[in-house]
Image: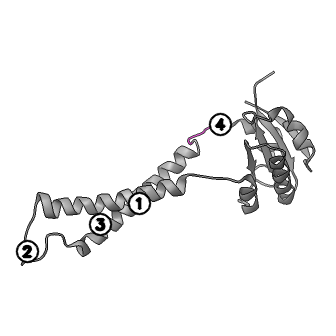
Amino acid sequence: MAELHGIMAEYEKPGDLVAAIHKVREAGFRNMDAYTPYPIEEVIEALDFKTKMPLLVLCAGIIGCLGGFGLQYWVSVIEYPMNYGGRPLNSWPAFIPITFECTILLCALTATFGMIAMNGLPMPYHPVFNVAAFREKAGTNGYFLCIEASDPKFASAREALSGTNASEVNDVEA
């Protein structure tokens, strides 16, 4: 028998999927993922999905802001000071556009590459495509919940998913 990635249940309606997620979370399952043909906010809330992306982007923005301002200050005041008509060397209002641009640049790069890294991309193949119903309905009208084999309570996953309003429960081979 092949190694399992998890157990997958198929649901006819998004409401059934959300109810099933709540039920299996109450049963103590944590390593699961839901697959829907379009984004459903209730599913994300039910999965209690958390990400570190906002914190990463905030940190990158702060670094970009300080780096952009610091670079301009260093060049204008320390490394190459030029006195134009008695103006101050540290003319911070003139530094604002570049500081803003450096902030946005680092935020955008962090968000882009952070999303790629945290989503595990590029991923040319995922084990859930081993389930025939998933291949047929995932992009059109199927709602799926997969409890992964890495969950500590995985031994009772089939019974938990069978107790929901699932139309079909399948093994997902790795």
Q: From this view, report whether residue 87 is shown above or below residue 106.
A: below
Is the Cβ of the residue at disc 1 closer than 8 Å to that at disc 4? no
Q: Amino acid at mark 2?
A: Tyr
The residues tagged by marks 4 and 3 sit, at their Cα atoms, a distance apart of: 42 Å
The residues tagged by marks 4 and 2 sit, at their Cα atoms, a distance apart of: 61 Å
The residues tagged by marks 3 and 1 sit, at their Cα atoms, a distance apart of: 13 Å
Say whether residue 16 is left or right of residue 149: right
Is the Cβ of the residue at disc 4 closer than 8 Å to that at disc 3? no
The residues tagged by marks 2 and 3 sit, at their Cα atoms, a distance apart of: 20 Å
Disc 3, SS:
helix
Q: Earlier in the sequence, mark 3 or mark 1?
A: 1
Disc 2, SS:
loop
Q: Amino acid at mark 4?
A: Tyr
Tell me the residue that label 2 is attached to.
Answer: 84
Q: Earlier in the sequence, mark 1 or mark 2?
A: 1
Q: Residue at x 7, y 77 (%)?
A: 86
Q: Amino acid at mark 3?
A: Ile
Tell me the residue that label 3 is attached to.
Answer: 98
The residues tagged by marks 1 and 4 sit, at their Cα atoms, a distance apart of: 34 Å
Q: Earlier in the sequence, mark 1 or mark 4?
A: 1
Tell me the residue that label 1 is attached to.
Answer: 61
Q: Earlier in the sequence, mark 4 or mark 2?
A: 2
Residue projecting furthest to the top: 1
Q: Earlier in the sequence, mark 2 or mark 3?
A: 2
- Percent x, y for residue 109? 43, 54
Q: Amino acid at mark 1?
A: Gly
- Percent x, y for residue 84? 8, 74
- For label 1, count other residues whose C-alpha is less than 10 Å away and answer few (under 14), some (14-19) or many (20+): many
Identify the mark at residue 125; answer none if there is no mark. Answer: 4
Q: Residue at x 72, y 34 (%)?
A: 150
In the foreground, 165 or 69: 69
